[in-house]
Image (spheres, grey):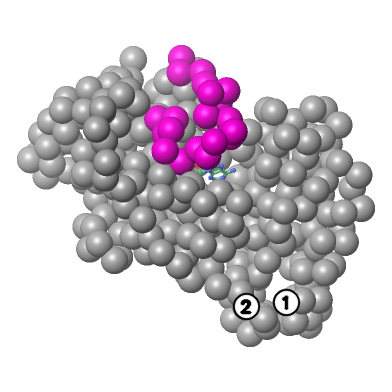
Amino acid sequence: MIPVITDIEEMRLWSKSKRLEGVSLGLVPTMGFLHKGHLSLVERALKKADYVMVSIFVNPTQFGPGEDYNRYPQDFERDAQKLESLGAHVIFAPDSTAMYPTGYSTYVAVEGVTEGLCGRSRPAHFRGVTTVVSKLFNIVMPDVAVFGQKDAQQLAVIRRMARDLNMSVEIDAGPIIRETDGLAMGSRNMYLTPEERKQAAVLYRSLCAAEELVKSGFTNSRDIIRKVREIIEEVPLAKTEYVEIVDIDDITPVDDISREALLAVAVWFGTTRLIDNVILAK
Ligand code: AMP
């Protein structure tokens, strides 16, 4: 069976001994309840590094009050089986009290890039993400870490953090893996009722429509955003939180698609918040 390390010091030693052998190390950070999206990142990491570590840690500091920390889905046995059959080398599953012991008081906060899109409704979220990712990098010292384009703002934030803090890790990104009707795979999709699940396919439909608009010559962000909102709002159970077109690196608004730009959406279905995005290019 794939080794599971829960102790931070043991993980550090495992990594260190591998590094001494001169092999390269890849890390895929996750919160578990793995689906094909996560697994595609593991496959990517396996191509880029000799040994691949997958962390499974539901990180309390990235959840806001009233969010789903206490009911976040988990199935460790199933995750371990999937990782084993893919050929990942080790699971790092630390305890939250070991990661955040009594008196814990250090956070990594990236400014600017964290303030738009999801940062508006989830003000402490990215600080939790950058803190835990920094901790994971310090513990396992990977050569490469793989993240999903699904969380495009998170990716921009982590790239910025790694650059600004001179972290010696390559940040790699894998494409969004989707269900057959286009819904981006996500651990939170399981919260959707059957009707919400059906209607949630509108997200991808709206992103494809935006791509078509750009292909047919539309470049004005306001026009594209209006169309995307219209499509989403045709669906009765969808409540739009945001539809925005922003710079891929800075997450600042882009008025005109004269170069690549990120179209990002956040939409509520009942109590479930879904995000999705596409990179638009003229
Ligand atoms: P999570 O467990 O939700 O924190 O996600 C762990 C990693 O998997 C993050 O880098 C996500 O961006 C990535 N991820 C989640 N869903 C998908 C997906 N559908 N396709 C590709 N990557 C994904």
Q: Residue at x 45, y 67 (%)?
A: 112
Q: Quadrant of residue 230?
A: bottom right
Q: Secondary structure at mark 1?
A: helix
Q: Which percent across, then down, holds residue 57?
A: 40, 30
- Mark 1, Cα crowd under 10 Å, few <14 / some 14-19 / many 20+, is many
Q: Residue at x 30, y 24 (%)?
A: 97
Where are the magenta residues, as a range?
A: 57-77
Residue 257 in view (yes/no)? yes
Q: Earlier in the sequence, mark 1 or mark 2?
A: 1
Q: Which percent across, then down, holds residue 244?
A: 68, 66
User: What's the magenta bit mostly, secondary-structure-wise?
Assistant: loop
- Mark 2, Cα crowd under 10 Å, few <14 / some 14-19 / many 20+, is many
Q: Quadrant of residue 187?
A: top right
Viewer-closest of 125 and 238: 125
Q: Is residue 133 left or right of residue 82?
A: left
| Residue 67 located within the stretch drawn in magenta | yes
For the residues marked 1 and 2, what is the alpha-carbon distance in whole angstroms?
Answer: 7 Å
Q: Secondary structure at mark 2?
A: loop
